[in-house]
Image (spheres, rainbow, N blue to C red):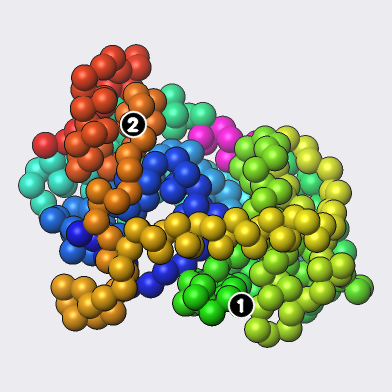
Amino acid sequence: MGSAWNRSWSHSRQRLFDTCERAFHFQYYPWDEPDTDRTRFLARIQTHEMVAGDCVHWAIALALRAFQRDRTVLDNLQEAAVRRFRETCTASKWITDGMKAGKKPANDGVVLHSDFYGWDGKLRYLAARENIGTCLRNFEAGEHWAFIRATDPKMWEEVDPPMARMPKFRLSEEHLRHATVYGGFDLALHHGDLTFVIDWKGGRRSSSADAQLAVYALGLTLRDKKPIPAEQIRVQAVFLGEQDPWNPRVVSAEELDTARQRIEAQIVLEESRTTWTADGRGRLASIADREAFRPTPNLRKCSECKFGQICGEGRNVVFGGLTNGSMVASPTK
């Protein structure tokens, strides 16, 4: 049995559930698993692409805060982000080497999937580093950045807020109110009579961002403090893998309704597989049996899943079939 102390919804949470329910269980219900510490450690593992995306967002937040503070425009974003990426990857190697030598895993820091599972990650490292440069060059030259600099920084909402202050809301239906819905957009700013919501993406254009933006708009219309009418909201996902033009749009009433239904359906589905009770530490928690969350194993997904060491179904798929070139799944002992 695994447990979680609270229930929430986010785009990334549902995306993992849709990819593999068993991986979702390991990620979000780690407490009181047979090996809680190891499950929580595996949940921290990231790929080079994920780390690069975090570095791009960190650099953009750095630029936004500098401009918000005194209208300074930073000119070393690429260098700073690449340096952070390199340092993060180096620290991952130290943590993994320490584990192989029998040391207790560090409590913080990123562990790279390729380091932990013994893959050759050089090509992925180089590609991710190159993507950082591409994304930040497109950010600095982008029409959206020019628009942002033309607005009043005092009218921006908090840049890169911690989880405690991240925009969130609850659904009105009584049986769903205990689930917090997080809308972690990258920036919201008020300009004239409109509110613009911007979310930066590290790749190329994808239609999946539309559903995410609809949730953000829904959150702004439902939040407790200073809700905003839907007709005054404009949204855009800016894809930094290309020179994306600035073209914010209105979220339709149908999209908002679909977003609400999507959230409610996911929460109800998760509710059907869990129980609220006291966990092993006597705290009220959401308790779940891993068997209630079905795995959907296939070679590609399982060979890249960070929970390969504790998922029997995934391990059988990877080691019972063929591996892909240099990406040999070789779990650390």
Identify which residue, 333 or 10, lies in the foreground: 10
Magenta extent: 128-137
Label 2 belongs to which residue? 297
- State yes or no: residue 131 in magenta: yes
Q: Which element carries disc 2, helix, strand or loop?
A: loop
Q: State whether the magenta stretch is mostly helix, strand or loop.
A: helix
Q: Which element carries disc 1, helix, strand or loop?
A: loop
User: Where 125 falls versus 44 (above or below)?
Assistant: above
Quadrant of the rendered image containing residue 149? bottom right
Q: Residue at x 44, y 29 (%)?
A: 124
Specify the amino acid type for callout 2.
Pro
Label 1 belongs to which residue? 172
Can you give x and y, in whole percent of width and height, for residue 267 in the image? 48, 62
Q: Which quadrant is home to the N terminus?
A: bottom left
Left or right: 244 as drawn, with respect to 60: right
User: Where 242 falls versus 175 (above or below)?
Assistant: above
Mark 1 Cα shell of 10 Å, populated few (<14), some (14-19), many (≥20): few
Mark 2–mark 1 Cα distance, whole angstroms, equals 36 Å
Can you give x and y, in whole percent of width and height, for residue 255 in the image? 75, 55
The total of numbered circles placed on residues is 2
Q: Residue at x 91, y 73 (%)?
A: 192
